[in-house]
């Protein structure tokens, strides 16, 4: 049996009892951190249970278990280290002015350094927990938003998430300055107010983009999921943030456009259109008679307007005389906005136009050249060259 005298023996400035307490606390913290973190997560979830109204406890625990584990581990490690004495003096922190040849200094013990380091880490872990709670709240709100037909809430939730997380980060920053570095926060904020003009000028573009994001939410020229076109970029809006809007283009790339550009430029919300326009021209050979041209444009226009996928106000007309053929212009609107269906309708109409042209003893023109000679071709070789040139 170990007697009390053994635990009172001193090694490197600490008793054996202190070392045993250090090891016991550290061991319990490592063993129980996962269990305690799950219990604390479930306890915190009870505060949000009525808010979630769904079985989101697994998501809540998954978000909080890691930061709570870090918090518990840091706390137990801090308690364990505090069982030991720290008599050493480390490098001193110098401040103030020189008085003669003497510089005023304040000695800092090893224990003070450890206390400040752990306080810094513990405060970080606490605010990490707050950030994860915001992630959970946004997760629940996004789930509720997905159950509604209104897309504005799908766009608002990520924005509010970033807003509140930014506020938490700022609060955490000033908390660290006040408690760890003992900075007078009120004096610092007052100093920031005096230099606010300089900061505003330096962050002019960022502020403009932030104001642009609020303008987007208030004016609602588009919402997440809309197909838009701005500054030559066309794609689907995926996210509206503080500084920029992210658009997934048709090439599956991600385009990031500053919010100021989204509201200052010419923006087309293609999702709000009620039809899609098709406009193109075809060329008929010059051998086509006037009567055939009349029948072709009449039949094309009649077919387009009778198609169930068009708006019924399409036009086909003989436009001009081209370099290689007679130009016919065709315009119509497809009322079905689904892209795959739109492509099918356009293809169907194009194939019918080909049939109409062929049925009326005409053909499509293509670039040709003719060689006209002043003398008749005599030899077979000249005739062959002439035929090739005509073709």
Image (cartoon, grey):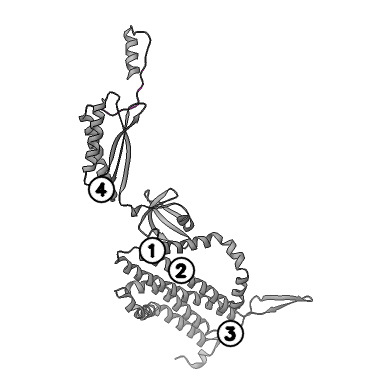
Q: Which residue is mark 3?
A: 13
Which mark is drawn over residue 163? 2
**Which type of secondary structure does the marked residue at label 3 adopt?**
loop
Q: What is the chief secondary structure element of the magenta stretch? A: loop
Q: In the image as oriented, which residue stretches furthest toward the bottom?
A: 4
x then y, percent, for residue 186 = 59, 78
Camera-nearest residue between 371 and 51: 371
Q: Which residue is mark 1?
A: 155
Does the residue at mark 1 contact the one at mark 3 (Cβ under 8 Å)? no
Q: 237 left or right of 14?
A: left
Which mark is drawn over residue 341? 4
Above or below residue 327? Residue 78 is below
Above or below residue 17? Residue 194 is above
Q: Earlier in the sequence, mark 2 or mark 1?
A: 1
Magenta region includes residue 368 = yes
Any part of residue 314 in sight = yes
Magenta region includes residue 147 = no
**Which type of secondary structure does the marked residue at label 2 adopt?**
helix
Q: Earlier in the sequence, mark 3 or mark 2?
A: 3
Query: Residue 148 appears in which quarter of the rendering?
Result: bottom left
- Judge depth for marks 3 and 2 and give the one in front: 2
Q: CA distance from mark 4 to mark 1?
A: 28 Å
Q: CA distance from mark 2 to mark 1?
A: 13 Å
């Amino acid at each position: 049996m170990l007697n009390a005298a053994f635990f009172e023996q001193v090694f490197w400035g600490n008793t054996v009892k202190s070392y045993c307490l250090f090891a016991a606390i550290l061991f319990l913290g490592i063993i129980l951190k996962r269990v305690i973190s799950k219990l604390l997560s479930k306890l915190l979830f009870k505060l949000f249970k009525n808010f979630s109204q769904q079985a989101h406890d697994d998501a809540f625990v998954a978000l909080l278990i890691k930061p709570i584990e870090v918090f518990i581990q840091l706390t137990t490690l801090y308690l364990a280290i505090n069982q030991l004495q720290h008599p050493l003096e480390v490098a001193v922190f110098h401040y103030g002015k020189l008085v003669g040849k003497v510089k005023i200094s304040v000695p800092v013990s090893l224990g003070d350094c450890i206390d400040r380091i752990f306080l810094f880490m513990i405060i970080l872990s606490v605010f990490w927990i707050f950030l994860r709670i915001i992630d959970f709240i946004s997760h629940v709100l996004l789930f509720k938003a997905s159950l509604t037909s209104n897309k504005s809430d799908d766009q608002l939730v990520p924005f509010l998430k970033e807003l509140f997380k930014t506020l938490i980060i700022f609060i955490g920053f000033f908390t660290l300055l006040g408690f760890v570095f003992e900075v007078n926060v009120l004096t610092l904020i007052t100093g920031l107010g005096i230099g606010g003009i300089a900061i505003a000028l330096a962050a002019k573009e960022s502020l403009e983009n932030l104001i642009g994001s609020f303008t987007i939410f208030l004016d609602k020229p588009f919402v997440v999921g809309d197909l838009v076109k701005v500054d030559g970029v066309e794609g689907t809006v995926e996210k509206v943030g503080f500084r920029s809007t992210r658009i997934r283009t048709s090439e599956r790339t991600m385009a990031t456009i500053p919010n100021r550009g989204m509201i200052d430029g010419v923006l087309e919300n293609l999702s709000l259109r009620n039809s899609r326009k098709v406009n193109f021209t075809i060329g008929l050979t010059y051998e086509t008679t006037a009567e055939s041209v009349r029948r072709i444009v009449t039949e094309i226009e009649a077919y387009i307007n009778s198609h169930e996928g068009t708006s019924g106000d399409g036009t086909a007309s003989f436009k001009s005389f081209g370099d290689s053929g007679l130009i016919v212009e065709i315009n119509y609107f497809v009322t079905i906005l689904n892209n795959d269906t739109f492509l099918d309708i356009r293809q169907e109409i194009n194939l019918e136009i080909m049939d109409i042209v062929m049925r009326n003893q005409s053909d499509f023109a293509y670039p040709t050249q003719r060689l006209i000679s002043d003398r008749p071709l005599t030899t077979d070789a000249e005739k062959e060259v002439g035929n090739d040139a005509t073709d």
